[in-house]
Amino acid sequence: MSGRISKEFIDELLVRVDIVDLIDSHVPLKKTGANYVARCPFHVEKSPSFSVNRNKQFFHCFGCGASGNAISFLMDFNHLDFVEAVEDLAAFAGLSVRREQATSLVDTSKKEDLSSLYQVLEQVAAFYVEQLRVTPKAIQYLKSRQVKGAIARDFLLGYAPDKWSVLSERFSQKLLIEAGLLVVKEDGQAYDRFRSRIIFPIRDKRSHIVGFGGRVLDDSLPKYLNSPETPVFHKGKEVYGLYELLAKNSKPQRIVIVEGYMDVIALAQYGIYYAVAALGTATSQAHIDLLFRFSSELVFCFDGDRAGREAAWRVMESAFSSLKEGRSCRIMILPTQHDPDSLVREEGVEGFVQRMQSAQALSEYFFDYVTNGLNLSEVEGRSQLISKARPYLERLPEGTFREMMFSRLQDLSGMASLSGADNKFIAQQVSLNKSHQQAFNRLSSVRVAIALLLQHPALAEVVEQKDIDWTGLEFRGIELFKSILGIILDKKSVNTAVLIEHYRDTPEEKIVTSLALLDVYMDEDKIETVFSDALDSLLKQARDASITRLEAKARSHGLDAQEQTALVNMLTMK
Ligand SMILES: [Zn+2]
């Protein structure tokens, strides 16, 4: 299926599905008053602060601030991306996803190109598998590494023969080049990239083969070779072994990240099916975010040599922005002269698992690393520690984990508070809160009007009845109010969840979400009056502001005819 998911379908889906049923099937809910509550699935807590509102079709946690509609819930709970969440929600509602027709010809032809690219990669993989079967020395090599037939099949291991043009004799040269399987010389001649190598096909999450890794049978160099970046292969985003891992277990308790393809294979051999490897690149933040979608515990495994330690530090740098409570990263440094393969062979699965469990938490590793070589009994050492550590800690997302890391730094540096910057930070917060407060007071009728409209879209009718002339009205919040009103009037049926959905990934998302949550305490039968009053007062403020603005302009630059009329209209309305 190609094409974008239609926006109308998403709106319809959010009206059809009941978020209470959806969440209840993942986290059992209890009814209390108008809401349904549970212990929050997104943070650890003893008493329930997670609440689901059937009218708004919205969830919110007072503890950690998590909130959103049914799509957001599935994204967060099941670690899905947007499209996957919509697909799952549609399945839950028993609907099939409607997509827009691909409109331009360019798009369709591009899609076709990719599918023929996937196809040729698939065929080449099958060819390599066949070649393995008829090459005794390759089979011998795998046997020497104790790779069993079943594992070789699971991972589609193959062999690229020691020839320069076996692929172009069989497949389209154009596609092979696009797939990165041929190396093109300056004179235009092309030859096979992979020769005389064990082949490890790399599959994406959706089982497409996107590239290959190849390892020599002897000690010649380079030991490993990878497909280059292609339209379907992005090394910074894919990890080797993830597809195979998810095929065994879609929610692994932990994922261990090793350095090479053979490490992944060797661990699988011993029943450790939850290993993956980065593809000849350093582990990136994108890799880490990807892996955290499937498991909350990542163990990074490194060689005990200098290169291994440096790699560990680089991973830590990438991991920092992804760390928060509920997620754990461990750094496992292997004994020197060992790789995961040799270690699991020597110590067995239990020994290896034991090592993973007792591996240093990233937080400990971090503080060990930054305090290494510093004399913390001296002021110089402690201040060096702060300047070394703080830039990293500042990258941590807001939350308990961040606070704990800062308080650990405070303990180590022996400072009661991290002075300077922190006081500045607190001062900033205070003045921010103050200006928020002022903004709240000043804009309270805007906030009330927007909040009520979001929470009770049927109020759009009240606005319609007022027959408002919006021309010339420029006031903070008016644009947002009009845009929400526009969505409501445009649709047959709409609820808070649908409205929120329209602002996903827009600059207004935050304010819309917080207004949807804003508690405006009142009786059900007062809502209309309060809304109507808030709207009147909002319009009055907007008119006053516009009148002031137009009058000032009249004095300085003069007004054009349109502005004249607007001013007169507004003055007469007053
Ligand atoms: Zn929570």
Image (cartoon, rainbow, N blue to C red):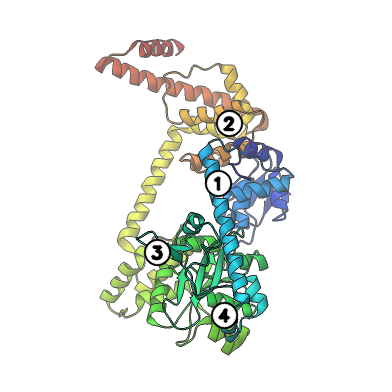
Q: Earlier in the sequence, mark 2 or mark 4?
A: 4
Picture quadrant where residue 126 is located: bottom right
Mark 2 vs mark 4, CA separation in Å: 69 Å
Q: Which residue is mark 4?
A: 138
Q: Which residue is mark 3?
A: 393
Mark 1 vs mark 2, CA separation in Å: 42 Å
Vertical relation: 375 (above or below) 206: below
Mark 1 or 2: in front is 1
Q: Camera-side residue: 490 or 40?
A: 490
Circle 3: element type: helix
> Mark 3 Cα within 10 Å, few/some/many (few <14, many 20+)?
some
Mark 3 or 1: in front is 1
Q: Report if the CB atoms under discs 3 and 2 are less than 8 Å apart.
A: no
Q: Earlier in the sequence, mark 3 or mark 1?
A: 1
Q: Report if the CB atoms under discs 2 and 4 are less than 8 Å apart.
A: no
> Mark 2 Cα within 10 Å, few/some/many (few <14, many 20+)?
many
Q: Which residue is mark 2?
A: 453
